[in-house]
Amino acid sequence: MKTIILLSFLMPITGFFAGVGITNKQASRAVTWETDTIYKDNAPYALLLRKGRSTMKEYSIRTLTNSEIAYAKYDANGQDAGGHEYYRFTFLGSGAFGHFPLTPKMDKRLSEAVVENELVADGAINPAGERRFLLIYPNRPVLQNKDNCDKPQSH
């Protein structure tokens, strides 16, 4: 009897977590990056072009008409106090920039950030998306030189 009650209690919980797993898989499939194109829900959304062959590549974010709206370049001059490294993400129209954390799968993570923040709208930079991106990934003026951790760097 106790076993039946326990199983009937666990079934809805198991079903709930199974449903969450399906939702997360669907969400992760919503953004893909293949051959320089970012896809949102299987439709082309923007371009993410890699420059350079080194480990720390540069990235160009472009509209589907190949108009560059932003770029990301590894910030070799610094890291934060916790040792985290960043890419400097610069918007070309406004000149505003923020710092995007270095991650093992930069292509995938940058693609996701472009879509999540809706950086492209109507074939151009989306100003609301740019503001949202900069709120999440602000300029980090406290970046420090790796050789002299006490000396802040200016950008």
Image (cartoon, rainbow, N blue to C red):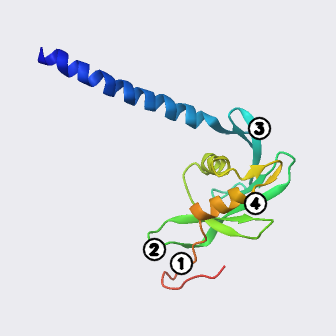
At label 3, the amino acid type is: Pro
- Residues at marks 3 and 2, CA–CA distance in whole angstroms: 38 Å
Q: Quadrant of the C terminus?
A: bottom right
Q: Are marks 1 and 2 in contact (CB under 8 Å)?
A: yes
Pointer 2 or 4: first along the chain: 4
Q: Secondary structure at mark 3?
A: strand
At label 1, the amino acid type is: Val
Res 40 quadrant in image: top right
The residue drawn where x is 83% and y is 48% is: 123
Q: Going by the image, does 148 lie left or right of 107?
A: left
Mark 1 or mark 3, which is nearer to you? 3
- Name the one closer to the observer, 9 or 90: 9
Task: Give the residue at mark 4.
Answer: 70
Q: Is residue 142 above or below residue 114?
A: below
Task: Give the residue at mark 1.
Answer: 142
Pointer 1 or 4: first along the chain: 4
Classed neighbour count for the residue bearing mark 3: other residues with Cα under 10 Å, few (<14), some (14–19), many (≥20) = some
The residue drawn where x is 64% and y is 59% is: 133
Q: Are marks 1 and 3 in contact (CB under 8 Å)?
A: no
- Name the one closer to the observer, 126 or 153: 126
The residue drawn where x is 85% and y is 54% is: 67
Q: Is residue 49 visible?
A: no
Q: Are marks 3 and 2 in contact (CB under 8 Å)?
A: no
Residue 127, position as x, y percentages in the image: 74, 60
At label 2, the amino acid type is: Ala
Name the residue at the bottom extreme.
151
Pointer 1 or 3: first along the chain: 3
Task: Give the residue at mark 3.
Answer: 44
Q: Is residue 55 visible?
A: yes
Q: Are marks 1 and 4 in contact (CB under 8 Å)?
A: no
Res 14 quadrant in image: top left
